Image (spheres, grey):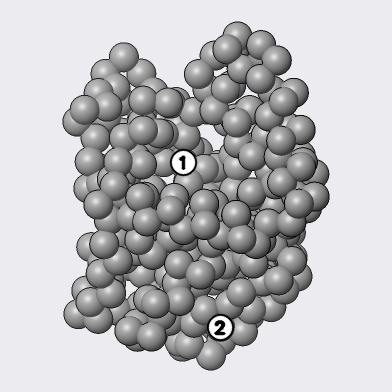
Amino acid sequence: MKEPSSLQGSTRVNGAVLRYTVEGRGVPVLVIGSAVYYPRTFSRQLRDVCRLGFMDVRHFAETDDSFSPERMTLNTYIDDIEHVRVEVGFERAVVVGHSHHGNLALEYAKRYPSKVSHVVLLGSPPCDVKGTLAGANEYWASHASEARKAVLRENWARLRSGKLEAMAPKDAFIARYIADGPKYWYDPTYDASPLWLGMPVTMELVAVFRNFFAQYELLWNPTLLRAPVLVVMGRHDYVVPHVLWDTVLPRLQHVSFHLFDQSGHTPQLEQQTLFDQVFLEWLRQDSPVRAV
């Protein structure tokens, strides 16, 4: 019997309600991060050959009065992924993460290797927060055009005119992200506002989540990480620059790396057709899992 083409629901974990949505038919693909934001970044065509499951993580989920940021650990997040995987009925899945959610996907794959067929990292850093920030600052200074830098200055000039201070913390967080668009997108004038519509953001947990990677080390132990890995980066990603991978890639096994020339931090949205081609061809070649 064929699986239904779409499914929506939620599951309660300690202190939070994690939503999920499943769309399409085919290879099971679990996208970690948000059931609101990330469905907007993948092509409709990909749903014709993949069963895409999108799940919230705690900093992008609704919380209740039992929420305790100080009790959250990386293992909490990993357990949440496993909980949702079972909930949506994925026996074994391609696990996808964008930005630091990619690091989360890697850690999940190491904990539950039998449940992960492949791992996909989109704009993810191979180092800790300090190293990422230092690399981003250097890459922006040396590679961003003067026109791009001018757009960033204009964005922040508009935002600083008393608006940011008057916003709720969640709204200020989103406003900063949008103002920093020239660092995130190939098109420096791209307005990311629609991607954030309806997004819950728990600011206390945003800080907690970032701290998970304050001393992060990319451990590519083949005895723990058995699944093949696809890394996709954008040449115009100025927050997680692709050059961070230059010294890391030579010592990794079972990894495919692709740099998209007309993408920033979100290549699956900015170059959807190319991403679908690269992703599906990699699935066909790198394992017995059928992509169509």
Query: x and y percent of residue 153 in the render?
Result: 71, 35
**Quadrant where the C terminus is found in the figure:** bottom right
- The residue that appears at 49% across and 82% down in the rendered structure is 256
- The residue that appears at 30% across and 41% down in the rendered structure is 211
Residue 113 disc label: none
Residue named by callout 1: 56
Secondary structure under tag 2 reads helix
Most foreground residue, 107 or 131: 131
- The residue that appears at 27% across and 27% down in the rendered structure is 69
Secondary structure under tag 1 reads strand
**Quadrant where the N terminus is found in the figure:** bottom right
Near mark 2 (Cα within 10 A), the count class, few <14, some 14-19 or many ≥20, is some
Check if mark 1's residue and mark 2's residue have beta carbons within 8 Å: no
Q: Looking at the rendering, which quadrant does residue 219 occupy?
A: bottom left
Query: x and y percent of residue 5 in the render?
Result: 64, 56
Q: Amino acid at mark 1?
A: Asp
Q: Amino acid at mark 2?
A: Trp
Query: x and y percent of residue 244 in the render?
Result: 45, 67
Query: x and y percent of residue 146 in the render?
Result: 76, 51
Question: Eyeballing the image, is 81 above or below 256?
Answer: above
Residue 282 disc label: 2
